[in-house]
Image: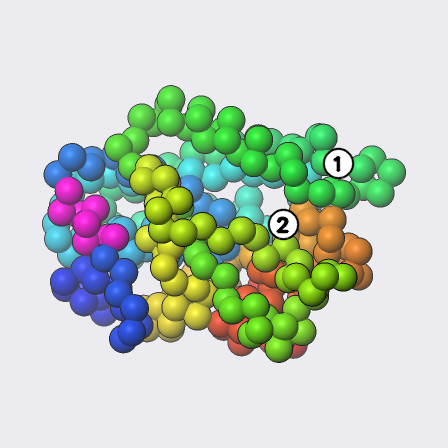
Amino acid sequence: MDHGVNRNLIVTDGKIEVTRFKEIVEDNSIKKIAMNISGGADSPLVLYFIAKSISISKAYDKEIYPHFMIDTGNVISNRPSWIPKQVDIVRGLFPDVTIHDLMTQEYRRTDDWDDTAERYIRNSGAKKYCDKLEENMFNIIQPDLLLTGTTRNLPSNLLKLYGHQTDSTGHIINAGKQLSIEQIPKKERSPWHKVNKRFIAHQYRKEGLMENLYPITESCVCESMGEVYETGGKDFPCKVCHQCIEKYIAFGMYDRCVAK
């Protein structure tokens, strides 16, 4: 079944080419592919394209193992219920591809939790918990490859133009650290390491995923980023965090298809 994908397995917007899916499909040493899904727009699109590439190339000896780490302290997030639906949508589009049941692991960043304020006050503990759960996932699944959906940030001047919040030194709040291609570990390399959210949005529209997959993606981090609360963003989507601004610039909508 061809869903509009170029049969050379190269994903492009006409300017930038992503060849990672082609490389994976053509690598006979890769059989078990673990896929970390965060629930945002980026990672389910990785799942979509790797499943599509397997289907087009008929590389049915490759199997996908989706994995999700739930932050149980984020009580307003739809991710626990939406991520299984994301997986089901991709599975329905490519029924010939083996996509295993979603492996779910829970954590709560207790060292970041303020009982008085009933919210997270910083984000320093997340990586510690996620690294531990990821190690557990590797021990259970023993994959040949781990895929993630990390993208590059949009240009800072563009984020500021759209009203992104900055700190007292003028730096973008919660923009995250950019990694060079060389700094991204091979086992965790994201196919999107060279592209930003506008590229992702282009693929959603080109592949016809705006009606089924996009509405159940969630990017806002208003509950897990203390800085967002300091800027007054307490609604969901908050419309002020880095992830919200990027999504609006790329898609013209925030989470839950909120347009303004």
The residue that disc 1 covers is 113
Quadrant of res 146: top left
In the rendered image, the residue lying farthest to the top is 139
**Left or right relative to 69: residue 86:** left
**Left or right relative to 193: residue 169:** right
In the rendered image, the residue lying farthest to the right is 116
In front of the other: 151 or 30 = 151
Label 1–label 2 contact, CB within 8 A:
no
Q: Give percent across and percent down for residue 200.
A: 40, 65
What's the mark number on residue 77?
2
The residue shown at (56%, 36%) is 127
Q: Is residue 55 above or below residue 132?
A: below
**Under tag 1, what secondary structure?**
strand
The total of numbered circles placed on residues is 2
**Left or right relative to 207: residue 232:** right
Q: Which residues are magenta?
A: 20-27
The residue shown at (67%, 46%) is 224
| Image quarter hosting the C terminus | bottom right
- Say what amino acid the circle numbered 1 marks: Trp
**Left or right relative to 119: residue 152:** left
Q: Give percent across and percent down for residue 80.
A: 55, 44
Q: Give percent across and percent down for residue 44.
A: 40, 53
| Image quarter hosting the N terminus | bottom left
